[in-house]
Image (cartoon, helix red, strand yellow):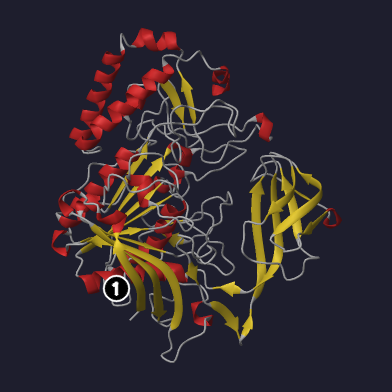
Amino acid sequence: MPVARLNLSAQPFQDGRPFGEIGPYQELFGEAEFAVDPDHPLNQIIVDLPLAPRDSEGRVRFAADVRILHPSDPTRANGGLFLDVVNRGQSIFPRMLEPGPMGPATDVTEGFLLRRGFTVVSCGWQHDIPRGGGRFGLTAPEALAEGRSLTGEVTTMRTIDAPTSTLALDSTYLPVDASTGTLLERDAPTGAARVVPRDRWRFGDDRHEIRCADGFVPGKTYEVTYAAIGAPVTGVGLLGLRDIVAHLRRTDGLSFAIALGASQTGRLLRQFVHLGLCEDEDGHLVLDGVLAIAAGARTTDANRRFGQASSQDPTPPIFPFTDIVQTEPATGQVDGLLRRALERGRVPRIIHLNTSSEYCSSSAYVHVSAALSHLTANGRADVEVPESVRIYHCASTQHAPAELPIDSPSGRGVNPPNTIDYKPFVRSAVDNLTQWITADTAPPPSRYPRFDDGTLGGDLRPATDADGNEVAGLRHPDVSVPLATYTGWNRRNPATGGDHLLVRAMGSTLPFPPATIRARYSSRDEFLTEIRGAAETLVAQRYMLADDVAWVVRASGDRWDEFVNLDQLASHAGKG
């Protein structure tokens, strides 16, 4: 059995408070021990798995932190398992589905999933996350060659926001020789590189940082490359996610399973699908549905020798980009995210949901180029979306929305960040995906910018209307009935250097002048009536839940109260 043992302790979740008709939940927390067959055809996709030590039965063992939330009364459960694909060791489902800010501190308050009766599972998958302290990490086996540790090259990259002479390495790998290595400086993450002389920088005493005699310059990107020793099998975390779902479905009699990931873990789910890991060692489809949020066209660095599962390096997407199978023009490679699943007849249902930040690109900065996920491999034409897939673009949003009131333009960006909360679209997507799996009720059609209708520009950015808001995709009521221009991009504040670059994953809120707002809407009541109408239209189209209309209207009222009293921000000049 791939799950060899679960070592869990139980307690009432949130002191036994009830979640609607489902009632109270139990929380099980502890460790899962795994034992996988390195020779199994489906496992051979994991890099270096054959080089890991084996037990007496020829299996490779590893362990991960795990938490299970399940109804105290199992007869009230909905039969579904919800895989919370944790982001850098922290639970993701509360910040994507619960009311409130979209940050690591978001807690279960309303209980969106729990009121529906899901069993919610969180499991560590990253070897480079410290275990304990409430985080979900994983201890991976080390790949060995004839009993010896492997050596190899490691690269880590960082853009500087403030003057400093010390730079922490975004990596858990330590250098073999602190006197070697290469440090490059760039004016942009993808720009030309200059070598920093080796006598001007050194590794810190603990080798977890580097120090530069001349200091690191704000706005510049630094890339350090060095030889490291000790290569964990980074991809076993993907097997752990697959196998904990398979085990619980089998032992608890759960009839379907959905996975949600956002940002880094949305990228992981794209990789999970591409590697054919929705199917377990017994040939069963264990993940029936996948909801990948804010992932663009990228995957992760989680299945490579000396891979960095938690890396935030601004690397471009790597082929394949689309669900369908295509041929990469430069190399002739034939591939697609669903290729392996289609070949074996184990095809999950997938919803991709992206924000405007995933489309942002320029000659100076590339984020994640989400347009590649629905274009031909040469980037020149639209491709059709498979019947098992939906693609939704949350128009005029940023990677993770900021809260009201808007910040003054004195932070990392020249403009205040984007405050459009796209959680209602995520919540609706969960219900639509559930119905798609359990009742074969197809979700509403895909909505995203396309070349053929003029809503995607030649620069691969979504087209905008006269207000500067995007026209394609799911338009939040605050976008279709606007008080501001909302973008997925924001230029770096000159105080942080590199003001020709974009801030990674940050958008802009550019409020209309109060006089313009008053001229467009006769009153607050008229504005909120239009907001409610736009929300109810989205409900009728099944892109939003009826329960969320009041939430949206209330937030729009707060937006009115703030914006209508603002003097025109000096930062409005940053719109260009």
Left or right: where does residue 68 sit relative to residue 132? left
Left or right: where does residue 545 sit relative to residue 146? left
Amino acid, disc 1:
His
In the image, residue 426 sits, relative to residue 408, either above or below, namely below
Numbered circles on residues, count: 1
Q: Residue at x 56, y 62 (%)?
A: 308
Q: Residues within 10 Å of mark 1 (few under 14, many from 20)?
A: some
Identity of the residue furthest to the bottom in this view: 56
Q: Residue at x 63, y 79 (%)?
A: 149
Residue 450 appears anywhere in the view: yes
Q: Residue at x 37, y 28 (%)?
A: 471
Residue 201 found in image quarter: bottom right
In the image, residue 27 sits, relative to residue 563, either above or below, namely below
Of the 4 image quadrants, the one containing the N terminus is bottom left
Left or right: where does residue 494 sit relative to residue 540? right
Which residue bears the numbered disc 1? 247
Closer-to-camera residue (530/383): 530
Identity of the residue furthest to the right in this view: 199
Residue 541 appears anywhere in the view: no
Of the 4 image quadrants, the one containing the C terminus is top right
Image coords of residue 407 (percent x, y)? 52, 28
Closer-to-camera residue (221/273): 221
Q: Residue at x 22, y 42 (%)?
A: 444
Image coords of residue 253 (percent x, y)? 19, 70
Image coords of residue 166 (percent x, y)? 74, 50
Image coords of residue 528 (percent x, y)? 28, 20
Residue 245 found in image quarter: bottom left
Secondary element under disc 1, as helix, strand or loop, is helix
